[in-house]
């Protein structure tokens, strides 16, 4: 690993030497920085390039940080607040003869045969996942319609829990969405789908990518900010 200083920030980066003519700077979704450089390139030359791209690197890292949400620890007790589609609901636990979860007014009600924290957590996790599975398909269909002028097949949708990201577009042509996104508003969910679909046209977060995102979703910055706050 190597480092350069940019104002009060220190940028760490790794170097991969390859048979190439130019130096490429990459910021990965985990916010790590990798430099692809020619075999005979000196570290001083590489550092000069990184220094010139420092502002862009910091911007990209801040962008990817939105996909690294840290949720507060949940205790799954009565009165605790939980989100669903951008709204806050108060958790209510009722002993019942069956296990199920329902929204009743401003309450997220867990009916359970056993008032146990792990049981409540499991029921809520399962409920969120089922809701996400149904809603994401609908939102995905609507988001994909915005790309009907582009000649590509609709990627497979996969719902998978991820510790550090809301969504991703994989090399195997899949759109992967974190079921935790069901806690955000429908507009925020659509923004994530549109963001990932834009990667089918522009793979990197280049100026062309953001121009495309702006064209498809002019208000994307608003929904991105909502996600960051959440």
Image (cartoon, rainbow, N blue to C red):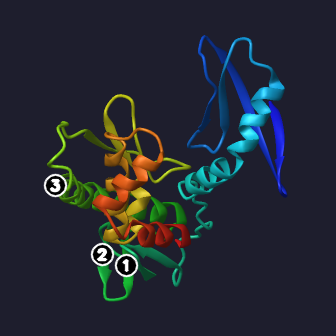
Q: Is residue 127 visible?
A: no
Q: Residue tagged by mark 1?
A: 109
- Identify which residue, 175 or 134, lies in the foreground: 175
> Gap between marks 3 and 1, in whole Å?
35 Å
- Identify which residue, 17 or 122, lies in the foreground: 17
Q: Residue at x 75, y 29 (%)?
A: 46
Label 3 SS: helix
Q: Residues within 10 Å of mark 1 (few under 14, many from 20)?
A: many
Label 2 close to label 1 by CB (< 8 Å) = yes
Q: Is residue 193 above or below residue 220?
A: above
Label 1 SS: strand
- Identify which residue, 55 or 30, lies in the foreground: 55
Query: In the image, residue 30 lies at what x, y percent?
Result: 61, 43
Q: Residue at x 16, y 54 (%)?
A: 145
Q: Is residue 81 visible?
A: yes
Q: Residues within 10 Å of mark 3 (few under 14, many from 20)?
A: few
Q: Is residue 30 left or right of residue 160?
A: right
Query: In the image, residue 144 lies at what x, y percent?
Result: 20, 52
Label of residue 145 in the image: 3
Say which label, 2 or 1, has the lower sequence index. 2
Q: Is residue 83 left or right of residue 15?
A: left
Label 3 close to label 1 by CB (< 8 Å) = no
In the rendered image, which quarter is residue 200 located in?
top left
Query: In the image, residue 163 lies at what x, y percent?
Result: 55, 49
> Gap between marks 2 and 1, in whole Å?
5 Å
Q: Quadrant of the N terminus?
A: top right
Q: Is residue 40 above or below residue 53?
A: above
Label of residue 102 in the image: 2
Say which label, 3 or 2, has the lower sequence index. 2
Q: Is residue 166 left or right of residue 48?
A: left
Query: In the image, residue 45 lies at what x, y percent?
Result: 78, 27
Q: Nearer the viewer, mark 3 or mark 2?
A: 3
């Amino acid at each position: 690993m190597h480092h350069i200083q940019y104002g009060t920030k220190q940028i760490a980066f790794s170097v991969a030497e390859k048979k190439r003519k130019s130096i490429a700077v990459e910021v990965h979704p985990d916010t790590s920085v990798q430099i692809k450089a020619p075999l005979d390139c000196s570290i001083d030359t590489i550092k000069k390039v990184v220094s010139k791209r420092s502002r862009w690197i910091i911007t990209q890292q801040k962008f990817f940080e939105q996909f690294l949400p840290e949720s507060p620890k949940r205790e799954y007790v009565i009165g605790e607040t939980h989100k669903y589609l951008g709204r806050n609901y108060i958790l209510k636990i009722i002993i019942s003869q069956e296990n199920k979860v329902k929204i009743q007014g401003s309450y997220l009600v867990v009916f359970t045969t056993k008032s146990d924290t792990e049981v409540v957590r499991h029921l809520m996790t399962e409920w969120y996942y089922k809701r996400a599975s149904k809603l994401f398909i609908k939102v995905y269909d609507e988001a994909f319609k915005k790309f009907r002028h582009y000649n590509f097949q609709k990627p497979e949708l996969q719902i998978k829990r991820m510790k550090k990201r809301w969504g991703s577009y994989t090399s195997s042509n899949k759109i992967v969405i974190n079921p935790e996104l069901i806690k955000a508003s429908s507009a925020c969910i659509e923004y994530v789908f549109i963001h990932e679909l834009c990667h089918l046209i522009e793979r990197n977060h280049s100026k062309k990518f953001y121009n495309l995102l702006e064209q498809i979703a002019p208000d994307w910055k608003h929904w991105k900010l909502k996600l960051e706050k959440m």
